[in-house]
Amino acid sequence: MMYSLIIPVYNRPEELDELLESLVSQSYSEPFEVVVIEDGSSLTSSDVVDKYANTLSIKYLLKTNTGPGDSRNYGMQRASGDYFIIFDSDCVLPKEYLKVVDEQLSKEFVDCFGGPDAAHESFSDTQKAIDFSMTSVLTTGGVRGKKTTRFQPRSFNMGLSKKAFEQTKGFGMIHPGEDPELVFRLWDLGFKTKLFKEAFVYHKRRIDFKKFYVQVNKFGKVRPIIESWHPEYTKVVFVFPALFITLLDVAIIGWIFGYDLGIKLYAVYFSIVFLSALIHLKGIKKAGLAFVAVLIQFYGYGLGYLKSSIMISVLKKNPQEIFPELFFKK
């Protein structure tokens, strides 16, 4: 197969530079194409692309800002390959990545795959803490990766066949949430998805805790919208963060009035989280930051989910009217 690597970028040339550098170092020996889509950036990546013009087969496409989903579609429409691999610009690939993907697809072809993310040793303590929160089995971030089949890939590390793209027309205009929404439409059309556990990327997530809260809050708002579009794929696991913060608040109130069972149970859970982070991240400071990240993830996502559920399911509001920040326009 001919692979086209699809990379939308918005005002982040330094990130693209690191990603392209990791592509130069790939052990995969067959030709592949890189398609960079400049999504209306004011700080363009033209100099970065020129830097790799002689070492990578690269297309550089300019367009107005319509968001990452539409930019990926724009790139796939103009790509030469018959299988697309999609990355966020803040990812870096291990040198074996493309070789692993090719071996997996040769062994068992699927029209859509997803790979996990990992924290590189060079990441900051905050980046490592957020990565722990987003991927640990002790949070909802780790639940998604327990099944290798019927997996919901995420677009920071996602493969899509040309056939699947042409039949679905690609990503919608919602963001975030455009990737699970696409997966549901793929399933409706009979396409299979799968997790390639060994095809991981280093995902920088260059955000602080304030930006992390905004991000996970948007994730929470998006989920009830997608569930209203695809109710057959609703799962109870997506309610967990909202339930978690609600019961935690009840436990705190109970503790104030002398009923401490609830707060003791939460203390046990948080102790397990801290110890797991301590073992995984190897440092008290990083474990403490991971503890903060887990709280932010639960509260950000949970509050977003509760607000969106009430507005969509109870008050029957139009998602695009109440949450315009979640939708791009073509």
Image (cartoon, rainbow, N blue to C red):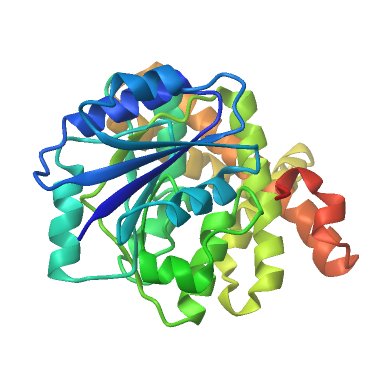
Residue 246 percent coordinates (x, y):
72, 51
Regarding residue 123, the answer to whether it shows in the image is no
Q: Nearer the viewer, residue 2 or 282?
A: 2
Residue sitting at x 58%, y 40%? 297
* 210 over 266 or under it: above or below: above
Residue 138 appears in view: yes
In this view, 313 is above or below 102 = below
Residue 235 placement: quadrant: bottom right
Q: Is residue 63 above or below residue 231?
A: above
The answer to whether 280 appears left or right of 303 in the picture is left
| Image coords of residue 228 (percent x, y) | 71, 71
Q: Nearer the viewer, residue 241 or 97?
A: 97
Identity of the residue drawn at 46% across and 42% down:
134
Numbered disc total: 0
Q: Position of residue 130 (x, y in %)?
A: 47, 32
Q: Residue at x 18, y 71 (%)?
A: 108
Identify whether 141 is placed above or below 152.
above
Q: Specify whether 20 is left or right of 247.
A: left
The percent coordinates of residue 262 (x first, y second) are 63, 49
Picture quarter with the N terminus: bottom left
Q: Is residue 122 left or right of residue 87?
A: left
